[in-house]
Image (cartoon, rainbow, N blue to C red):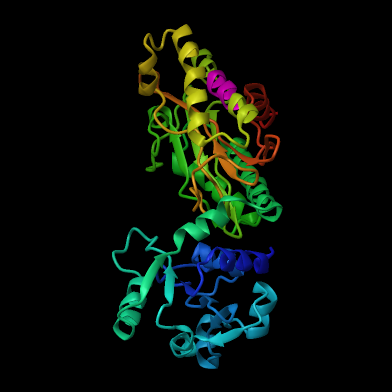
Amino acid sequence: MNYKLRQEKVLNLMAPNTIFCLFNKRLNEDAKKYDCNRNFFYLTGIAEFDDILLFVKNKNESFVKLYIHEIDPKQERWTGPTIRSNEATTISSIKNIGLINNFYNDLANYINYDTSIYLLENLDESKDYSYEDYFKRTISKKYPNIIFLEGNNILKKLRTIKDEDEANLIRKANIITNYGLNAILDNLKPGLKEYQIESYFDQAIKFNGATGYSFPTIAASGINSTCLHYSTNTATLEDNDIILFDLGASYETYCADISRTYPINGKFTDKQRQIYEIVLNGQKLIEKTAKPGLTTKDLNNILIQYYIPHLKKIGLIKKNDEIFKYYFHAVSHHLGMDCHDFCEYNKLEAGAIISNEPGLYIPEWKIGVRIEDDLYITKDGNINLSEGIIKEVKDIEDYMAKRNN
């Protein structure tokens, strides 16, 4: 990753005579390495908790400085080694390294009478209070006239457009996800609990190098497949039902976001196949259509206009607005270091990565189908980063049939 280029872009987007402070605070006591602040990691490649990243852009100079822990041999025996300055420079390309204990003293040297400070807003909605709030109060006591600026838009602008390295990490996350889905197909059968079939996915992605999950797995069988964000995963898989999976492995913070719908006994019923094919062809339409200049809202409207005549043809709806009884979410969202990424939702540009996830949910038939892939927008169209994950009816049924031979 070219972290130096990303840092330079932040400095270029900052207003004159400003400071930008980013704090990589631990979200909770059980937080793992890749639970770090995504924006901090995006700019440094460093996941160590409590480190601080400082951008300074004043009249005389512009620079980046990284603050890391002082080495504490006793503490390291409990929690492992902290990053050394030479390691931090190698990873982040930042040569100016300081110690966290010196941060506030150093900061005082960079604040002038007219300095403003960029901060990220509290992104952890589970907490009413953040370290940024503490920082604001601390600085305001000493500098009551200081102005704090919203820094989110700078990072949103940068993170919206992915480079090829980022696209390759999401492609890798999808390859790992495919291992998990194949493990599901290898073991899917009536009589299991939803959480039991989910466990095959868990083992396979960890075995194949996943560094985490993009989000909690949805394994929704039968009537549960018609609930968009079903999360219990406790029902028993029944013969002749389908099961909808919405899941993804993450790799070095980058997320795959995949949905697949499978017949539990290995064979779609006629009605299940009918709905599945409508959704699949809708997904192919969106993949064919997605390109720079469109918005995700445009793509959703295209899908809705595709759905209406097809659902009328099979007698599921009579009026156009009845479509929203069976389709009630958006077809795309931006994807990256977060499943719903920290991005600007404007017209698509080359470098954006979005989901392509049409669905139909019909409670009266106990059929919910969602099929989702991840698209990397290019100047001419898009590349499907998850194209190796099977989704054609014949491919799914053939795969499940062969496992028994």
Residue for point 56% across, 90% down = 71
Is residue 279 something that shows in the picture? Answer: yes
- For residue 77, which quarter of the picture? bottom right
**Residue 395: image x %, image y %?**
67, 26
Q: Quadrant of the C terminus?
A: top right
Image side of residue 254 versus residue 395, left or right: left
Name the residue nearer the viewer: 369 or 323.
323
- For residue 224, which quarter of the picture? top left
Name above or below for residue 334 compared with residue 401: below
Name the residue nearer the viewer: 308 or 274.
308
For the magenta stretch, what is the residue range? 276-283
Q: Main secondary structure of the magenta part?
A: helix
**Residue 308: image x %, image y %?**
46, 15
Q: Is residue 284 magenta?
A: no
**Residue 140: image x %, image y %?**
31, 79
Name above or below for residue 160 compared with residue 293: below
Image side of residue 118 versus residue 46, left or right: left
Name above or below for residue 164 compared with residue 68: above
Residue for point 47% across, 22% down = 304
**Residue 340: image x %, image y %?**
48, 48
